[in-house]
Image (cartoon, grey):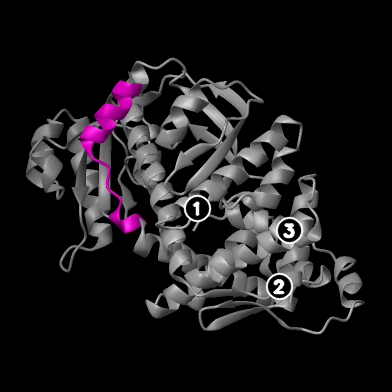
Amino acid sequence: MKSASYRLLLAALLAFSATVLPAAAAVQEIDHIVAVVNDDVITYTELMHQTRLIKQQLKQRSAKLPPDNILQKQILEQMIMERLQLQIASRLGIRVDDETINKVINNIARDNNLTLPQFREVLSKDGYSFAEFREKIKQDIIINRLHKNRVEKNITVTEKEIDNYISNLSHRQGSHDEFHLAHILIALPEAASPEQIRAAQKKAEQVWQQLQKGADFAQTAIAVSQGRNALKGGDLGWRKAGQLPIIFSNIVFNMQPGDISKPIRSSSGFHIIKLLERRSDNSRHIVQQTLARHILIRPNEVLSSEEARQRLTKLRQRLLAGEDFAELARQYSDDTASATRGGSLGWVNPGTMVPRFEEEMNKLKPGEISEPFQTQFGWHIVQVMARRQHDETQKSKRQQARQLIGKRKRDEALQNWLRQIRSEAYVEYRLNQ
């Protein structure tokens, strides 16, 4: 799990101050059910608690808030989708152990320069239950694992797809650009009827007309969008060209910052896109490579770690006296793969070797031989033969293309899967009852 998303959550929780909670507590509401989700329910108290938190997050971003009744509907739909996913995860037996949760929370505290006791104290002072925060982290991990189980494990990227991606971009002006987008989705259910399609299209066109007349895009997204980023004002963040859904790419490439697209039809509904910012990235990827060779001695039942070190010390002395490195590597190295090549590791990129090995290798000048040092694989001596600045732009492009195509496929597959589970679920709204 990445901790960046939790830092955002933490920032919101820390801002959810004690001044908010007493004010909320002053109003006594009779709790009742606001939604039935299959065999589960969401209560008014749960909805109000989540609404206060979301409003605090939106205010921190200086977002314009829609009326409370509209915002509550959006938040309730988000809670329904979360509840549906947790139900599926439970049926599939997806669990998370306490050690994993503790590790994530410790990482959040560390990233915010807090010890765990300090972190708990901050949450407590700001009126937020540590147990409640812990439960939220647990649910996020479970949902993340569910996505991997139901969606991501089926995603593959072929070499042909990478070739086509690079070829298509090479013929397109602005192919290296990055786009900061905002998005509004007027969703369609699976197997939508003609009447449902016409109604969604009419609503999308009405929203577009409002935006053309000056309506705030973020506020409108919060109020009407059914996309996953609706409560973030529809903000999709920065996307590289290859991350753009195919149905958006041709349109977005021809947009200027501030432009808003007309409604775009897809299987999931009608999309309205706003280009917030655009930037170009034509940088080349240059790395310093090291040509190196090594000899490895692994301790075992009959050879102690100290004896392995001493053996390498003697081999190093023989090398300094003029014996051939390749010959001694073939004769003595326990790394059979490189031993047949005279200990050669070839041209090594930064980050390829384990940290300890790379640290010792980087200390050497060409021609130098290291003192014996230990990694998890055993004891080594390494010789640097040469260094060079190597243009890895093409290789980097292919790696980046693989990542971007994979992310685009995962995003599209996840959106379709979420739409499917929503259409198959029994959901009864009681918010206005």
| Three-letter code for the amino acid on which mark 2 is drawn | Leu
Residue flagged by tag 3: what amino acid is it? Answer: Leu
Q: Within the image, what quadrant is residue 137 found in?
A: bottom right
Q: Nearer the viewer, mark 1 or mark 2?
A: 1
- Is 408 displayed left or right of 84 in the figure? left
The prevailing secondary structure element of the residues shown in magenta is: helix
Describe the element under mark 2 as helix, strand or loop: loop
Q: Which residues are magenta?
A: 152-168
Left or right placement of residue 217 versus residue 153 in this view:
right
The answer to whether marks 2 and 3 mark residues whose Cβ atoms lie closer than 8 Å is no
> Which residue carries the number 1 mark?
195
Q: Calculate the distance from the C-alpha at mark 1 to the C-alpha at mark 2.
A: 26 Å
Q: Which residue is mark 3?
A: 71
- For the point 70% across and 51% down, the residue is 223
- The residue under label 2 is 431
Q: Residue at x 14, y 46 (%)?
A: 333
The residue under the point 61% across, 70% down is 136
Asked whether 10 falls inside the magenta stretch, the response is no
Q: In x, y percent, where is residue 77?
A: 61, 64
Lower position in the chain sequence, tag 2 or tag 3: 3
